[in-house]
Image (spheres, rainbow, N blue to C red):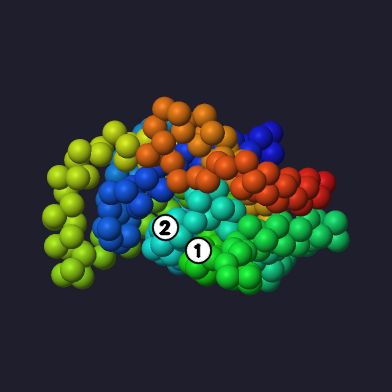
Amino acid sequence: MWFFAALLAAGLYAVAETCDNFLVNREFKHPLTLAFFAYTFSVIFVPVLFYFQPPSWPLLSTIPVFIAVGFVNFGYLWPYYKGLREDDTSVAISFLAIERIMVPALAFLVVGEVLAPSQYLGIVIIVAAVIALGLHHARRRFKLSKGVWYITWAALFLAFEGVLLKVLFDNGVTVSTAVGGETIVSFLFAATVLFSKRVRKDVVASSPLFFRLLPLFLVEELFTFLGLYSESWAISHASVSIVKAITMVAPFFLMLYAWIGEGISPRFFKEDLRRGKVVRKAFLFALIIAGIILVKN
């Protein structure tokens, strides 16, 4: 069951990432302004979660972990938004596979999690495929997309997030408590961007745009929240390294959504669907899936 929860998280995140792409590339100029609005909206789902799954009071010793996981959940957004501006959405999100090679090392150091050799091989295949996705041919030489560097920073934050969630679960924290607590702390960190005069002015100036796009924010944050819950549930029942590897299937969903939706609203998607590009992506995505299969076994 946890495998399907991890796979579901990938599909849910892909919807949210499609919305993120539109918001950061078409509507909002300042990533921190978008981050503030996103977390202001996401916190409204916490009471709903707590209604259906009442939280429990965590141990006092876990409070620093909640603060840390909330910080990294907010901190990844700036480089993540910057990365979305550099490449096709599916390619940029594929770069997050770099996180999958960080997670096993962190999981081993923090919670003593050890994988089989074939699983480590799967992680290496995933990362190699992602690096190939990030290579761009220009002027008779290959160079890495700028998006690789931005998403690498985002991946580092997300690697810590997964391991910190595992620490919470190992200390008896329930899934609803962990997800709700992380969201609330992330919102508090997002509110600190208002200390910047430039960001504060941009938030005020962008407020009419935010209210005009409320339905899109609702969809984006709902799917992000559901994806976080589904992924967290999977992490609470299985290895964090394996769950994180499985969620790498998100680029497949992204390309599928773009293929389906391009004829309806091409402006909403940022995806090169020319045959040669699609074949190359499909081949490298297949390598990522092969790596995921090795990781799962």
Verify CB contact (< 8 Å) between mark 2 and mark 1. yes
Vertical side of 13 occupied by 69: above or below: below
**What residue do we see at 32% from left, 40% from top?**
217
Judge from the rendering whether residue 280 lies leftward or rightward of residue 266; answer left or right: right
Q: What residue type is labelled 1?
A: Gly
Vertical side of 48 occupied by 205: above or below: below
**What residue do we see at 76% from left, 58% from top?**
125
Extreme residue in the front direction:
139
Judge from the rendering whether residue 279 lies leftward or rightward of residue 251; answer left or right: right
Judge from the rendering whether residue 133 lies leftward or rightward of residue 32; answer left or right: right
Mark 1 highlights which residue? 147
Judged from the image, the secondary structure of the residue bearing numbered disc 1 is: helix
Mark 2 highlights which residue? 85
Quadrant assignment for the N terminus: top right
Judge from the rendering whether residue 81 lies leftward or rightward of residue 26; answer left or right: right
**What residue do we see at 50% from left, 49% from top?**
89
Where residue 226 appears, as percent x and y from the top left, is 47, 38
**What residue do we see at 37% from left, 35% from top?**
219
Judged from the image, the secondary structure of the residue bearing numbered disc 2 is: loop
Q: Earlier in the sequence, mark 2 or mark 1?
A: 2
Alpha-carbon neighbours of circle 2 within 10 Å: few (<14), some, or many (≥20)? some
Image quarter of residue 164: bottom right
Q: What residue type is labelled 2?
A: Arg
- Cα separation, mark 2 vs mark 1, equals 8 Å
